[in-house]
Amino acid sequence: MKMHTIAMTLFFLAAVLAGQAHAGAPAGPVAIAIHAGAGSMSREDSSPEIDAEIRATLEQAVRAGHEVLTSGGSSLDAVSMAVTILEDAPFFNAGRGAVFNSEGVNELDASIMDGRTLNAGAVAGVHNVRNPVLLARKVMSGSAHVMLAGPGAEAFAREQGIVFEDDAYFRTERRWQQLQEAKAMETAQARREPDSWLSTVGAVALDAQGNLAAATSTGGMTNKRWGRIGDVPVIGAGTYADNNSCAVSATGHGEYFIRATAARDICARIEYTGASLQEAADQVVMQKLVEMGGRGGIIAVDPQGHLSLTFNTSGMHRASVDTEGELYIGIYNDE
């Protein structure tokens, strides 16, 4: 674990313990789920060693978020903690491991939402921000706005003391090669399958006070142009949380998730039709999105702590700890 992550963990846990002194012992069940992207995943294209590293990082992130919850901390702190760890890992398309746009630059989006108040914060198209999810949370708590973009968001980040890193921090050779391959295919006028683009990180949580939260972060789409923004910072598309229904974080071909308002749709089906969490997730991810041609998945949690990790691709990096404290980690669709 890197020193930055250790420091962040201690920061969150200190805040949790300070709050617990006033709030008392946890009053209700807690649960958390995380994802780190969905897509065309197969064991043949990976290796046992890489899979083991990914699973270890997923476990680290979900356990850290769960520890916040079991210490009496808020769902907002839990999802912030989990997503920060995923952003710091080089394996996933967020923060340090983000993909490159057509100009060879990492361009980052993130969002967070509080199910208790319906407050939300989002950032789009920012550069060199180490942990975009923490900036999104600052937008929610420290500004009068919901979404900030580009240079303005970066100026706000500097005012708020958000950590920046130079370009070298974000560069990974695997992502650079993906850009070169995408450009070669573009030159040859070959069509990339959208399924190969799906990569995001996110977390949803229920805390002991019965409050839900969701957070999502991404580097977007390899070789994206013209300042393309996907579903992640669009509240209701890639992220949504409402104590009356559920909390959702999505990963997928963002244009479809935006048009489907996928995250909000799942919550609305619970609130207005009485669907269970899994029924609502299946109706949106396995039916509506499939019929539209959209590929990807979601993680979700409801006020009772029921979890859904639902996807229509061959795999999704995912992990959860349920209300009984049981850990689950998966990558492929047969797990």
Image (cartoon, rainbow, N blue to C red):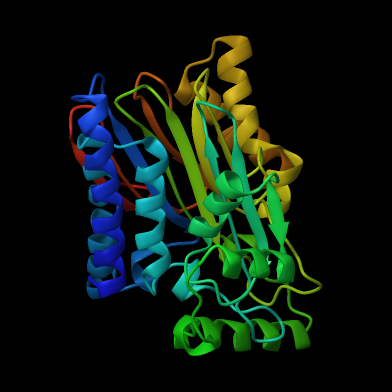
**Horizontal placement of 187 versus 200: left or right?**
right
Q: Nearer the viewer, residue 54 or 128?
A: 128
- Relative to 89, does residue 60 appear above or below in the rendering? above
| Residue at the (59%, 66%) spot, across then down | 159
| Residue at the (71%, 86%) spot, across then down | 103
Q: Number of marks in the image? A: 0
- Rendered location of residue 264, percent (x, y): 63, 31
On-image quarter of the N terminus = bottom left
Give residue 189's quadrant in the image: bottom right
Q: Nearer the viewer, residue 123 or 222?
A: 123
- Relative to 271, does residue 230 appear above or below in the rendering? below
Q: Nearer the viewer, residue 244 or 314?
A: 244
- Relative to 243, does residue 37 appear above or below in the rendering? below
- Rendered location of residue 218, percent (x, y): 55, 62
Give residue 160's quadrant in the image: bottom right
Give residue 210's quadrant in the image: top left
**Horizontal placement of 43 versus 168: left or right?**
left
| Residue at the (41%, 20%) spot, across then down | 303
**Furthest residue toward right:** 226
* Residue 203 visible: yes
- Rendered location of residue 232, percent (x, y): 62, 52
* Residue 293 visible: no
- Rendered location of residue 153, percent (x, y): 67, 64
| Residue at the (69%, 86%) spot, across then down | 183
